[in-house]
Amino acid sequence: MTEEWGLNKSEGIPLHQQIYDRIKDKIMNGEWPVGTRIPPQRELADRFGVNRSTVVYALGELAADGLIEAMTGRGTVVANNTWNLLSSAPSPDWNRYVKSGFYQPNIQLIQAINQAEAAPGIVRLGTGELSPELLPAGEMLEKLNRSQTAAFSLGYSEPKGSLALRKAVSRYLRSKAINASPASILIVSGGLQALQLISLGLLHRGSTIFVENPSYLNSIHVFQSAGVHMHGLPMDEEGLQTDSISRLKRQHNASLLYTVPSFHNPTGSLMTSARRQELLNICSRERLPVIEDDVYGDLWFDQPAPLPLKARDQQGLVLYLGSMSKTLGPGLRIGWIVGPEPVIDRLADIKMQTDYGSSALSQHAVAQWLSEGLYEEHLARIRGELKLRRDYTLRLLEEDYRELADWNCPQGGFYIWLRLKQPFSIRSLFEQALAEGILLNPGLIYDRNDRQHLRLSYAYAQMEELRDGLRRLSRIIRGLA
């Protein structure tokens, strides 16, 4: 329960009156315009921390005053407010504006996950980020305080990003056998912005792109909102299957292919070296550009992942995406695109039109960590921690899930792809688990037809949360099976 929804139970004002006042304030100040669907009674009771009957009483008073009304098929919505009654002209219909925007909303399940992640006490078994305890916040702050800041500026950086950072990234990429000059590198505010820039700058409405199925791209609408269609390609234990690419390219006139070859999101799979070369050969022959998303590539456990596609690229076919969000901290909002200079110039121009550059402070911090060897030291520690968490999670699965599910053993990254042996309503599982304080990432987020998978993450929840959450989840699954 946040401060916004918290009630003062000691000030002598009845709780139902406080709820009435809070909701009325939201209506009167325009936060909840006419037509807004207010949260269900049970959700309001949870937010305010009161019995449902208290909420029902407050809503009854609001309805009696004409501020809300129940509408068939829509629930309870804001009906009016004093300003609407007094003004000679009607207030703007913000709900119509909201529905008119070209950027598509998240699917309801993703919206529910995003909201639940902010709730206290939730065990997050699917969250795709490092636990706060694994992030080097203290070390980074100390380093910034002690650093020589003569070269640091709070002004705008040049269109492609800080030259110091691009030089550092260029040196770092050599460890992956990628030769990229600073001029061919664009600093972006995370991997998601990289995809947005590509969708805006390189693709036209009606284009088709190939993606792995399942795919992280199905959980966001960055390409769909740009009018781009996605066509899924099957995967096997070696990664993206390539045998149908040529035929489908001609059939769909595909514009490019998107892949996460190293520690794939959501399956955790690792594309073999042979399959990578095969994929690159086919895309080269078909003149099909590739977006290689390598945000998990540094998070290997026992041995490094095979060389990236970009390291094998001799034709400028691959746009390579990297990010610090999965390794150093999502709040830094720093990533990069590597590609042919004309493409980077085009995307840099669009970035300048949208945000005028990524955070100067974050760019300075990342440049320091890369240049002074701090990043490699941090990676060594994080790999060890993640491997311990993976092994612990696999032991928990062996104890409680052998009769319920199958799963893979990832060689790096964050994710275990859990397949439930008996299909049932994944939505019901999600809702029941959430009611008991467990947040899941169901497979249907990544493939709309998937009713048997869960993306488990061992990166975010603490060890005791993993144990408690997985054991309670197994009981819920048994109850639904």
Image (spheres, rainbow, N blue to C red):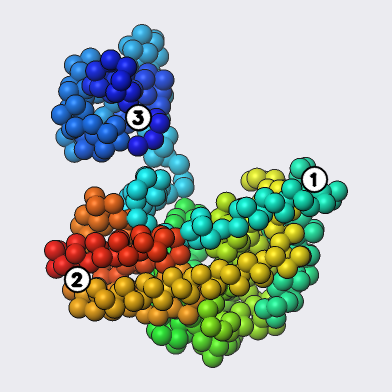
Mark 2 or 3, closer to the camera? 3
Q: Is the residue marked by circle 3 packed among few (<14), some (14-19), or many (20+) residues within 10 Å? A: some
- Residue type at mark 2 is Pro
Residue of label 2? 423
Seen in the picture, residue 291 relative to 436 is either above or below; the reply is below
Kindly state the secondary structure of the residue where label 2 is placed.
loop
Seen in the picture, residue 155 relative to 51 is either above or below; the reply is below
Q: Which numbered dot is residue 6?
A: 3
Spatial CA span between label 2 and label 3: 40 Å
Q: Is the residue marked by circle 2 packed among few (<14), some (14-19), or many (20+) residues within 10 Å? A: few
Q: Residue at x 56, y 55 (%)?
A: 330
- Residue type at mark 1 is Ser
Residue 103 appears in view: yes
Q: Is residue 436 left or right of 283 when viewed as pictured?
A: left
Q: Tell which residue pokes out farthest to the bottom in this image.
A: 274
**x, y (%) of residue 474?**
22, 67
Spatial CA span between label 2 and label 1: 56 Å
Q: Quadrant of residue 273?
A: bottom right
Residue of label 1? 153
**x, y (%) of residue 119?**
37, 45
**x, y (%) of residue 374?**
70, 65
The quarter of the picture where the C terminus appears is bottom left
Going from N to C along the chain, the mark reached first, 2 or 1, is 1
Kindly state the secondary structure of the residue where label 3 is placed.
loop
Q: Residue at x 57, y 64 (%)?
A: 327
Spatial CA span between label 1 and label 3: 41 Å
Q: Quadrant of residue 280?
A: bottom right
Going from N to C along the chain, the mark reached first, 2 or 3, is 3
* Residue nearest the observer in this picture, 375 or 23: 375
